[in-house]
Image (cartoon, rainbow, N blue to C red):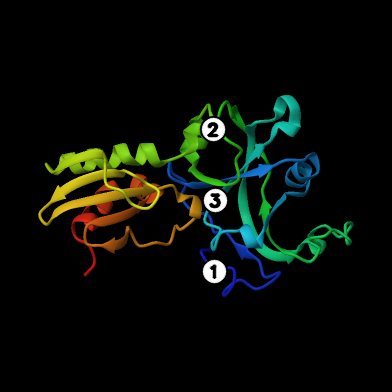
């Protein structure tokens, strides 16, 4: 299921999602729908498209949630529905929408995500003050319990879980440690292990890198951690941080 769309996925060759045990950390892709026609395609024709040039290297989510923009009036600026992703493949826009052959992007390539029935959320997730959305990754548990879009991001919860896991080991730990790294003036967390200080930066899984084997090491004192990986296995992440690959 986790394949590079440029090397392992052929055009019009579907890739099926195999049933997996669902748990709180089941990944959900939140995507934007900004017009009624695209929403009807998802609801009635059971598919959604993502431009290949903006798409992830992997389709690594089990569900798609639809964020309806303000163009939907009272039903807009919120997530009302989600659906299981059944399979996906690559096709041109004109293959997906043959009644628009003269569209400027008619021959551009898209991921076509084939969906199950749209499922209404128990309560819509509203966007009260967050900037305009594009794509984000959250979890099934967050999707089913959040009341506001801002609750779908995973970094804060991941930081809290990592902090607790480090404290359980009796190690010194500090959140928001002031060490500059590119555009992030603070590390999410710094801990002091047997070999000194380690700065940990937690990334939202919005780049959809679910295949990474733990933190991405840049040098001996900096670790990059995927928030979803951390939420799933905080103890395993701490173990890898304290014992980096040689």
Q: Secondary structure at mark 1?
A: loop
Residue annotated with mark 1: 4
Marks 1 and 3 in Cβ contact (< 8 Å): no
- Classify 10 Å Cα crowding around label 3: few (below 14), some (14-19), many (20 and above): many
Q: Is residue 114 above or below residue 120?
A: below
Relative to the observer, which residue lies in front, 85 or 241? 241
Residue 5 x %, y %: 59, 68
Task: Please tell me the numbered disc located at residue 62.
Answer: 3
Relative to the observer, which residue lies in front, 53 or 149? 53
Relative to the observer, which residue lies in front, 197 or 234? 197
- Classify 10 Å Cα crowding around label 2: few (below 14), some (14-19), many (20 and above): many
- C-alpha separation, residue under disc 2 versus residue under disc 3: 19 Å
Res 44 → quadrant: top right
Q: Residue at x 17, y 39 (%)?
A: 167
Residue 81 x %, y %: 64, 36
Q: How many marks?
A: 3
């Amino acid at each position: 299921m986790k394949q590079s769309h440029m090397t392992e996925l052929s055009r019009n060759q579907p890739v099926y999602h195999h049933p997996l045990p669902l748990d709180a950390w089941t990944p959900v892709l939140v995507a934007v729908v900004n017009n009624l026609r695209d929403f009807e395609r998802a609801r009635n024709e059971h598919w959604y498209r993502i431009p290949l040039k903006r798409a992830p290297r992997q389709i690594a989510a089990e569900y798609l949630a639809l964020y309806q923009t303000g163009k939907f009036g009272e039903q807009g600026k919120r997530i009302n529905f989600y659906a299981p992703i059944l399979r996906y493949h690559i096709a041109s826009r004109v293959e997906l929408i043959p009644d628009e052959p003269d569209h400027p992007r008619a021959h551009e390539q898209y991921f076509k995500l084939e969906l199950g029935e749209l499922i209404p959320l128990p309560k819509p997730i509203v966007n009260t003050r967050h900037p305009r959305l594009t794509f984000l990754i959250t979890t099934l548990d967050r999707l089913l319990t959040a009341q506001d879009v801002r609750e779908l991001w995973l970094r804060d919860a991941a930081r809290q879980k990592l902090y607790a896991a480090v404290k359980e080991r009796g190690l010194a730990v500090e959140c928001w440690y002031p060490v500059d790294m590119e555009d992030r003036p603070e590390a999410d967390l710094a801990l002091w292990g047997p070999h000194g200080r380690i700065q940990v930066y937690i990334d939202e899984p919005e780049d959809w890198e679910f295949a990474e084997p733990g933190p991405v090491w840049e040098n001996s004192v900096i670790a990059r951690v995927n928030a979803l990986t951390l939420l799933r296995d905080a103890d395993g992440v701490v173990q890898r941080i304290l014992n980096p690959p040689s």
